[in-house]
Image (cartoon, rainbow, N blue to C red):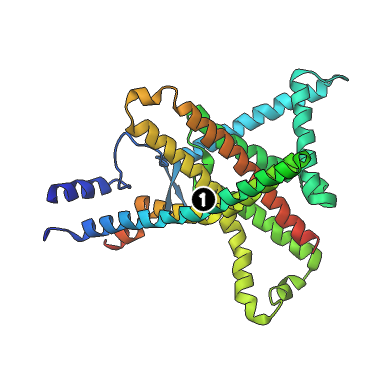
Amino acid sequence: MGFCMANLISGMSGMSMLADNDVDFMVHYLVPVKVFGQQVWITTTHVTTLIVALTILIFALAARRSILKGYEVPNGFQNFIEFLVETLDNVVHSSMGRHAKNFVNYIGTIMLFIFISNISGLFGLRPPTADYGTTLALALLTFILIQYSAIKTSKFRVITNLFKPIPLLFPINLIGEFATPLSLSLRLFGNVMAGTIMLGLWYGLLPIFAKLGVPTFLHAYFDLFSGAIQTYVFAMLTMVFITDKRDA
Amino acid sequence: MSNITNEGLVLACSAIGAGLALIAGIGPGIGQGYAAGQGAAAVGRNPGARGDITSTMLLGQAVAETTGLYGLVIGLILLYANPLYAKLG
């Protein structure tokens, strides 16, 4: 018993309780950086975010080239781009109505970023969205947009609206406002992190024959299906919240 | 059993706590199953509206999943960034 505990404690000297070298799904520190006297680290999340951003950039440049060349009857890649843009327009229009044209760029951007991030697990990267820093930043962007929309449409009724229907409910309404970005970010983070952990455990703990073929289905579910659903949900909730404030 | 250290006790209780936190998964399981059942019934009644029903169902399920994910996050914090263990100094 004593030996077992000692083992566990020495394992804790790393960061995790499961300090097994084979199981690996946490963020790794790479390069130390000093910012205003604070010690911070460049982590794997930064690197994968950069890779995702570069991927989107290359995709965007290719799309621009293809659209500039633009045939009357689209084929191949141009067809795909037009299909993407049309679908995006339809989705945003169906849930935002007359506000759609102001927000289609923002929604398109976060959808592309989150989707490419979520499926980056397929290519052996650790998804940037499995780091709470990334999802919190995304949710804060949405939160700022929501509050900006609220202030723009209802001026300083934003404050009085918090006291409706009765002043007693003010704390609850306030918490409700701040719960929006919290639940948005935790939802995305939790889903992607759960997939990352499942695959990390599968690759780390099972014998070699289980690692051939079977993970295909896990990747298909956790990376592709769950990733696509969470992208859609994040964008959809962003649109719903913003429209709610704009039409108030 | 007199040689259990403070650290060991905190770690063991954290592991139990993480397991208990994940009981939160029961709620979303029932909720999502119910939503999927209702979605299937709706498609059976009106197969033409399949697309709308599916997207509404998925959105509702994703929102229902949130409480379960809170449990997951608590579990992860207890296992990987334990604030109680840090408090022991």
Point out residue A220 in the picture as x, y percentages from the top left corner. 54, 31
Front-most of residues A58 and B13: B13
Front-most of residues A215 and A152: A215
Q: Amino acid at mark 1?
A: Gly
- Image point (34%, 58%), residue name: B17
Residue sticking out furthest to the right = A72
Point out residue B87 in the picture as x, y percentages from the top left corner. 30, 63
* Residue at which label 1 appears: B29
Q: Say left or right for B32 vs B55.
A: left
- Image point (83%, 50%), residue name: A97
Q: In the rendered image of this protein, does residue A58 appear above or below residue A102?
A: above
Point out residue A66 in the picture as x, y percentages from the top left corner. 77, 22
Q: In the rendered image of this protein, does residue A197 appear above or below residue A159?
A: above
Q: Say left or right for B63 vs A47.
A: right
Which quadrant is home to the C terminus of chain A?
bottom right
Judging from the image, what secondary structure is the residue with disc 1 in? Answer: helix
Can residue A136 be seen at all in this image of the molecule?
A: no
- Image point (48%, 39%), residue name: A195
Q: Say left or right for B10 vs B80.
A: left
Neighbour tally class for label 1: few under 14, some 14-19, many 20 plus, Cα within 10 Å: some
Q: Say left or right for A198 vs A100.
A: left
